[in-house]
Image: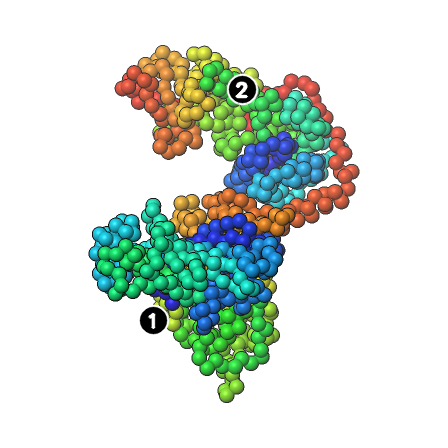
């Protein structure tokens, strides 16, 4: 888990699946992605999943892995327009931007306390002249993928520090089979490049470069600006929690896990085992918002509860009344029971909802630490040294509209409590409830402000040529959607209501409209002595 | 209270106008518990002939306002007895002015007359939510940058059988049901209330056609109150500003006030502009002359 308070802030993709042109998506604490089927909305999450599954490969020489959550026969298959086979094919470009905190003392120590004036002179990064103990940096990693001889490769890498007006960057490209780098366009041949998958590591032989050497200064600047952010990015991607829209059908009896799983699994595969192994371990969570007809308050108490109790409290807030419990079956395994019914015999909705609720709790940056109790939200956020990143696909699948609406309460509570979510959805109930929350929140209230600033709604549309585009909107104080109303999405149900209404009007007998003999008087209007 | 909808609210026009007008109708209905009666005399035609084509043309957010109005009306379960064979009479002039064929493809005069008679015959108070349209129920008077928007229809007259003469208020702003005189006069005029030094005092019989509502004062169109003070909009480009230029009518009152013309904060002004009915600012070169003495209605 990263401890640098790292958070992904943007994804830019190009030539990736149906995204032909460079497309930038700024990520909010709660990013909702909507769009028609096959509009390209899954591609946004998939761009992250490819990197995650690559990092999970034990062989660091695998630059990009196309087997796993995102599965492709070749890089061309996920390249826009599916180009024909050739000796070299330009593939997708994936660029990530993130924020992370850098401990400059660690960096300074790693490079042997360099002369800072010389570092500034060559790197042209002014703040390195008097680095503060901690500094939050915004960093970008741009990967150009390519296919050569039928295999997926990294074509080039660009690392940029986005902190300040003059953003220093390192370009890394392969030349004659060797990775070479340049600093702001100046070649740095003394610096060797190694890749851990797609993460570049730069080395310099200090015995062969003078302390004030220009390239040594470049390398020192790299250590300050990029080493810790890259480690943080690696942790963010490796720890990215993903729950897809499918679920593994639950067995009647679960086998106990010998070690607690570290992930819920893309289909909720390990949800039951985590629940079993961790049932008494403490998770921290902000309960789902409590919403009245005309008001909603910003919750500010984070609860610390054993996992099973936390699951039950959350399910209840989502209007699921049957309590969950874990029943051990000695020497065989365990069952999950909702009331008296086992998971196999409850509605499918519950078996879909359970991993979702559990994931939100499991993603607690303080997971399985501390004692039962509660603390103010601000204190919890302060104590969390990292943000959890969660990607969800169609979390509303198989849910009753009421529960789907209340899911919005849960997502907001998670996003308030150090989880950053990307949620792909077809649920107008969920999005409408988010709009409803901001409309209900008092004018100028803390919650209204939070929702306006921290919820982004991305609408993905694909044109006739098969190219996808994204429009990002924020909520408005009146419960509208700012820049662009997602077409054919939230209006479907209300438009259908209108269609039913007008169709019924036409079915009704029109004879009732024949005017009845009201007399129309042409005389002067009377002036009454009483006010109307 | 029963509300009827002006069919002109549903004529094609910019979406934002539709949305704002219908949101205002809903707000008034909810604030004053007005029931939108779905009387078959006009409701079905209103929705199938006017609202349906309008809804098709509206963007999603404006559609919502229209759908909400419909939902609000349809959710009413108020029973209103159907009309008998000789339900009563209405004075044509008002109905023709508002609902005649001039702006509609076919006249709504008879349908609205029947709906209004039926609603009034229920014994409840009835209002019509109207849209103001120049040349129909709105007349604009202008001198330089000063404009006066005269409402030319603020009441409809009817006589349901056995009930005698009744008036139906035409409502175009939420203030009309609080200070009813604003259905005829500008809703931005400050009303009288304890502690308000310079209120607009509506004429005693403000609703009577014979009562003059405005005239030209100092070459500007101005509303005339019961004290004969003239209230004109400030001479600011585009009709901007948050105050009224008030021409104090009599010498005695001018002496008491300190000036013959003062600037009074309008109703609905942002808080920073001052309280409605209080001095907004002293005219240039006349600082310190206002005594603070006002008037009461």
Tag 2: Cα neighbours inside 10 Å, few (<14), some, or many (≥20)?
Answer: few
Residue at 60% across / 69% down in the picture? A347
Mark 2 to mark 1 CA distance (whole Å): 72 Å
Q: Quadrant of the N terminus of chain B?
A: top right
Task: Classify B40 as above or below A231.
Answer: above
Q: Quadrant of residue B39?
A: top right
**Residue B285 falls in which quadrant of the image?**
top left
Q: Residue at x 65, y 18 (%)?
A: A524
Which of the pair B125/B172 is nearer the observer?
A: B172
The residue positioned farthest toward the front in the image shown: A176
Find residue B79 and report its horizontal and vertical position in percent. Answer: 66, 43
Residue B43 image position (x, y, % from top left): 68, 38
- Where does residue A405 sit, x and y in percent of width and height? 54, 57
Judge by depth and name the residue closer to the eye, B291 or A480. A480
Regarding residue B204, the answer to whether it shows in the image is: yes
Q: Residue furthest bottom?
A: A331
Residue A368 percent across, percent down from the top left: 38, 72
In the rendered image of this protein, does residue A275 appear above or below residue B28? below
Task: Reply above or below: A341 against A117.
Answer: below
Q: Chain of mark 2?
A: B
Q: Nearer the viewer, mark 2 or mark 1?
A: 1
State the residue position of label 1. Answer: A370
Chain under numbered label 1: A
User: Which residue is at a point 40% across and 14% down the rendered structure image?
Assistant: B249
A425 left or right of A503 in image: left
Numbered label attached to residue B140: 2
Residue A133: image tag: none
Estimate how packed mark 1 is, as few (under 14), some (14 to 19) or many (20 or more) residues with alpha carbons within 10 Å.
few
Residue B95 seen in the current view: no
SS of the residue at dot 1? loop
In the image, A308 versus B254, the foreground residue is A308
Q: Which quarter of the image is occupied by the C terminus of chain B?
A: top left
């Amino acid at each position: 888990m990263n401890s640098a308070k790292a958070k992904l802030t943007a994804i830019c993709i190009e030539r990736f699946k149906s995204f032909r042109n460079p497309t930038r998506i700024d990520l909010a604490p709660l990013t909702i992605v909507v769009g028609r089927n096959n509009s390209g909305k899954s591609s946004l999450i998939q761009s992250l999943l490819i990197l995650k599954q690559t990092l999970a490969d034990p062989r660091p020489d695998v630059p990009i892995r196309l087997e796993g959550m995102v599965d492709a026969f070749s890089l061309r298959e996920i390249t826009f327009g599916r180009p024909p086979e050739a000796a070299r094919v330009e593939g997708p470009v994936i660029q990530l931007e993130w924020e992370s905190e850098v401990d400059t003392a660690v960096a300074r120590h790693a490079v042997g306390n360099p002369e800072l004036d010389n570092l500034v002179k060559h790197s042209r990064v002014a703040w390195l002249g008097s680095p503060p103990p901690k500094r939050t940096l915004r960093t970008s990693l741009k990967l150009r993928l390519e296919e050569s001889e039928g295999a997926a490769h990294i074509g080039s890498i660009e690392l940029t520090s986005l902190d300040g007006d003059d953003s220093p960057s390192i370009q890394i490209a392969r030349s004659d089979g060797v990775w070479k780098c340049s600093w702001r366009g100046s070649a740095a041949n003394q610096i060797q490049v190694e890749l851990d998958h797609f993460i570049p590591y730069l080395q310099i032989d200090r015995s062969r470069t003078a302390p004030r050497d220009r390239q040594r200064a470049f390398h020192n600047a790299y250590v300050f600006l990029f080493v810790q952010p890259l480690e943080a990015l690696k942790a963010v991607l490796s720890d990215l929690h993903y729950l897809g829209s499918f679920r593994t059908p639950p067995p009647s009896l679960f086998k106990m896990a010998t070690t607690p799983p570290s992930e819920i699994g893309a289909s909720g595969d390990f949800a039951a085992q985590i629940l079993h192994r961790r049932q008494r371990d403490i998770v921290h969570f902000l309960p789902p918002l409590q919403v009245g007809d005309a008001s909603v308050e910003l919750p500010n108490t984070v609860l610390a509860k054993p996992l099973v109790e936390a699951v039950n409290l959350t399910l209840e807030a989502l209007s699921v009344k049957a309590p969950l419990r874990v029943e051990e079956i000695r020497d065989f395994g365990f069952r999950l029971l909702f009331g008296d019914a086992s998971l196999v015999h409850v509605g499918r909705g519950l078996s879909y909802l359970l991993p979702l609720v559990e994931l939100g709790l499991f993603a607690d940056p303080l997971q399985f630490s501390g004692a039962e109790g509660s603390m103010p939200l601000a204190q919890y956020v302060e104590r969390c040294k990292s943000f959890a990143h969660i990607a969800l696909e169609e979390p509303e699948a198989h849910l009753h509209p009421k529960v789907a609406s209340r899911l919005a309460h849960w997502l907001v509570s998670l996003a308030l409590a150090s989880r950053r979510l990307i949620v792909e959805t077809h649920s107008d109930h969920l999005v409408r409830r988010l709009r409803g929350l901001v409309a209900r929140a008092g004018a100028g209230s803390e919650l209204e402000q939070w929702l306006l600033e921290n919820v982004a709604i991305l609408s993905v549309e694909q044109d006739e040529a098969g190219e996808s585009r994204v429009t990002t909107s924020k909520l408005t104080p009146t419960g509208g959607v700012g820049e662009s109303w997602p077409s054919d999405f939230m209006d479907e149900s209300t438009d259908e209501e209108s269609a039913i209404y007008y169709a019924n009007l036409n079915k009704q007998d029109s004879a009732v409209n024949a005017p009845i003999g009201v007399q129309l008087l042409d005389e002067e209007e009377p002036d009454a002595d009483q006010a109307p | 209270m029963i509300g009827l909808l002006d069919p002109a609210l549903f004529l094609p026009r910019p979406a934002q106008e539709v949305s704002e007008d219908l949101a205002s109708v809903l707000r008034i209905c909810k604030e004053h518990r007005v029931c939108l009666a779905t009387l078959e005399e006009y409701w079905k035609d209103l929705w199938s002939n006017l609202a349906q084509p309008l809804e098709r043309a509206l963007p999603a957010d404006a559609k919502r306002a229209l759908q909400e109005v419909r939902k609000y009306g349809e959710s009413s379960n108020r029973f209103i007895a159907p009309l008998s064979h000789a339900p009563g009479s209405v004075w044509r002039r008002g109905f023709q002015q508002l609902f005649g064929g001039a702006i509609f493809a076919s006249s709504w005069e008879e349908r609205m007359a029947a709906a209004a008679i039926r609603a009034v015959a229920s014994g409840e108070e009835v209002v019509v939510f109207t849209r103001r349209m120049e040349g129909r129920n709105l007349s604009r008077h202008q001198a330089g940058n000063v404009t006066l928007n005269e409402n030319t229809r603020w009441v409809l007259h009817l006589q349901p059988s056995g009930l005698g003469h009744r008036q139906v208020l035409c409502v175009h702003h939420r203030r009309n049901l609080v200070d009813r005189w604003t259905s005829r006069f500008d809703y931005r005029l400050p009303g009288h209330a304890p502690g308000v030094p310079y209120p607009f005092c509506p004429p005693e019989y403000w609703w009577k056609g014979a009562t003059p509502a405005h005239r030209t004062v100092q070459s500007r169109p101005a509303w005339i109150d019961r004290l004969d003070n003239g209230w004109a909009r400030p001479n600011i480009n585009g009709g901007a500003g948050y105050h009224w230029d008030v021409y104090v009518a009599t010498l005695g009152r001018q002496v008491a006030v300190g000036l013959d013309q003062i600037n009074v904060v309008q109703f609905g002004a942002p808080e920073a502009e001052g309280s409605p009915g209080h001095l907004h600012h002293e005219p240039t070169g006349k600082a310190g002359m206002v005594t603070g003495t006002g008037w009461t209605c």
